[in-house]
Amino acid sequence: MNIDKTKAQMKKGLLEMVILNIIEKGEAYASDIIQSLKEADLLVVEGTLYPLLTRLKNEGMLEYRWEESKSGPPRKYYTITEIGRKTAGELVEGWQEMVAAIDLIIKKN
């Protein structure tokens, strides 16, 4: 078994929940999101993040606005919508239920 591959798949499955929760705390630029993930040892490359942000936006969970930057091209700042907040809450609830169930199994053995 390739443990690194399995861990990467687990992380991919949780990224939506984590990203929604990061943006729920306040408007965020992609670099801010990557920094928050890095601080939590959940390294994600831009090539993974941008398609996910686009999908979340297309599903109505995120909105964005453009802001001119003094040091380069305009920046896209993301905010969460009501649908995104509801989804984030449901994902966290599902995560907590899963962790509790897995803990029961692990502690039984």
Image (cartoon, rainbow, N blue to C red):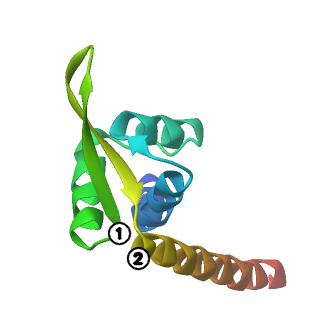
In percent of the image, x 60 and y 76: which residue is there? Answer: 95
Q: Nearer the viewer, residue 17 or 23?
A: 23
| Kind of residue sitting beneath label 1 | Met
Rendered location of residue 43, percent (x, y): 45, 41
Residue at the spot of label 2: 83
Q: Quadrant of the N terminus?
A: bottom left
Which quadrant is the C terminus positioned in?
bottom right
Disc with the residue nearer the chain's start (1 vs 2): 1
Q: Secondary structure at mark 2?
A: helix
Secondary structure state at the residue bearing disc 1: loop
Residue at far left of view: 73
- Determine whether 6 is above or below 73 in the image: below
Q: Is residue 5 visible?
A: no
Q: Position of residue 76 (x, y in %)?
A: 26, 41
Q: How many marks?
A: 2
Q: Which residue lies under the disc numbered 1?
A: 61
Q: Are marks 1 and 2 in contact (CB under 8 Å)?
A: yes
